[in-house]
Structure formats: C-alpha cells, structure tokens
Amino acid sequence: MEILTFGDLDFLQLELLGRLLLATLLGAAIGLERERSGKPAGLRTNILICVGAALLTEISIAITFYGSPEIQPDPARISAQIVSGIGFLGAGTIIQARGHVTGLTTAATLWVVAAIGIAVGGRAYVEAIGATALVLLILAPMSWVESALEARRRIRPVVFHLVSSTGVVDRIQRVLDDAGLRSRCTRVDKGEETISAVFEIQGDEMAFRRVRSEVVELDEVRGFNME
C-alpha cells in the first residue's frame, strides 16, 4: 500500500483549503443575491451549504482512494445523502398559505448550491464556476421578467361609480378592450341616481393606469376605487 509522507499531507491540506475557499466564494456570490432580495436563506446559509457539500464530497473521495484496501467504499453514497439532506432543508423553506405556494425558488437555489459544492469537492471547478454564473443570471435579471409577467397576470378589481345611463357599462368595456386589457364586468349595483360597476381587469400595469385615466374622463363616470 502506498505510504503518504508529511509533505504529501501538507499539500493535500492546502489543496483542500483552496477548494473550501472556492466553495465559500461561490456560495457567497449566490447568497449575496438572495440576501439583497430579502429571502430567508441568505448569505450564511448558502455559504454553509456549499462548503459542507464540498467537504463531504472531498471526504468521500479521500475515503475511496486513501482508505483500507480491504474495504470497498462507494464515494457516491455520501453525495446521495447530501441531496437528501438538502431536500429536507428546502422543504422547510416552502410555505403554503391561502392557496399560494412560496419559497420554491429558495428551495431550488439551495439544491443547486449544494450541487455546486459537490462539483467543487469533485474537482469540477469550471463546471462549478459556470453553474454559479448561470444561477446568478437566472436569479437577478430573470426576476425582473418574472415580475413583469406576474403584473400582466394580476387581476385588479376596480369599482367605477357612474351616472345611470344607457350603455355606459358597455362603453367602459370597449375602452378597456381597445387598450388591450382583459376585463369583465362582474357586478352592477344600482342606486337612486348612480350605479357602481365592478370590473375585473387583467393586463399590463402601464396600460391599466393609462386607460383608467381615460375612463375617469368619460362624462358618465364620477370616480372609481380599487376593491
């Protein structure tokens, strides 16, 4: 069996420290973005996960190559347990309330950070750095795209207060349709002199603000309020 000298051990220790430092930097890059976004799993969480995954992967490799020849260790077993453990942590970040599920992106980010740590521990440095850059690209610019799409999907209940007049609700409907907004009148409440028409409006935020001003300028409209 090959015997390691003290010089070899010193080199291996320095190499291990370099890998852990790289895992720290990559985890910190993603953690900073999460911290700036106000997410619960921020800087320290992502660093610890990345470093821990790298260290465990390093240990599994070391056991395989420098362990006893009478034992046949499997280096993939520890990596598999890393994935299971991160799945448990990710589940803790997912919250369901009133039919809405939040925290899925945070859970997925933790899972990818663990994968980056495994790549660092497995000496796949280029892949780890490239994956980190890709994750940052997805988390930062893509969040703006996601917010824009969410604004287009959001349904805004608006109550227009109108002077009772034939066809006024249909006129408002046409103005909204011409602006490219999806809308429907869900309720009309009639008073003695005025009526209140409740519309559910969906579409671009800027178009919604512009057309709202146009509707208010109609002679029959006395005002509006958001439900």
Image: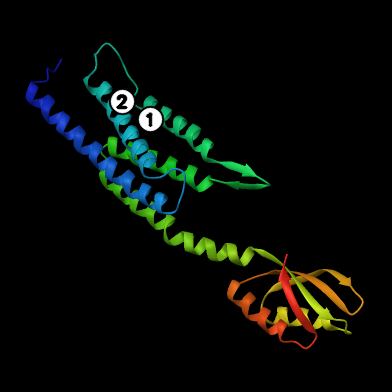
For the N terminus, which image quadrant? top left
Task: Say whether residue 126 is left or right of residue 80.
Answer: left
Task: Say whether residue 71 is left or right of residue 10.
Answer: right
Q: Residues within 10 Å of mark 2 (few under 14, many from 20)?
A: many
Q: Which mark is residue 79?
A: 1
Residue found at the very far front of the displayed protein = 192
Residue 49 image position (x, y, % from top left): 37, 36
Residue found at the very far top of the displayed protein = 70
Residue 3 image position (x, y, % from top left): 12, 17
2 and 1 marks in contact (CB < 8 Å):
yes
Q: Which mark is residue 60?
A: 2
Residue 217 image position (x, y, % from top left): 71, 86
Label 2 and label 1: CA atoms lie apart by 8 Å
Task: Say whether residue 85 is left or right of residue 195.
Answer: left
- The residue depicted at 45 percent of the width and 51 percent of the height is 38
Q: Identify the mark nearer the N-term, 2 or 1.
A: 2
Residue 172 vertical placement versus 151 (above, below):
below
Task: Say whether residue 5 is left or right of residue 98.
Answer: left
Name the kind of residue labelled 1 in the image.
Answer: Ser
Under circle 1, the secondary element is helix
- The residue depicted at 77 percent of the width and 81 percent of the height is 222
Name the kind of residue labelled 2 in the image.
Answer: Ser
The answer to which of 126 and 159 lies nearer the viewer is 159
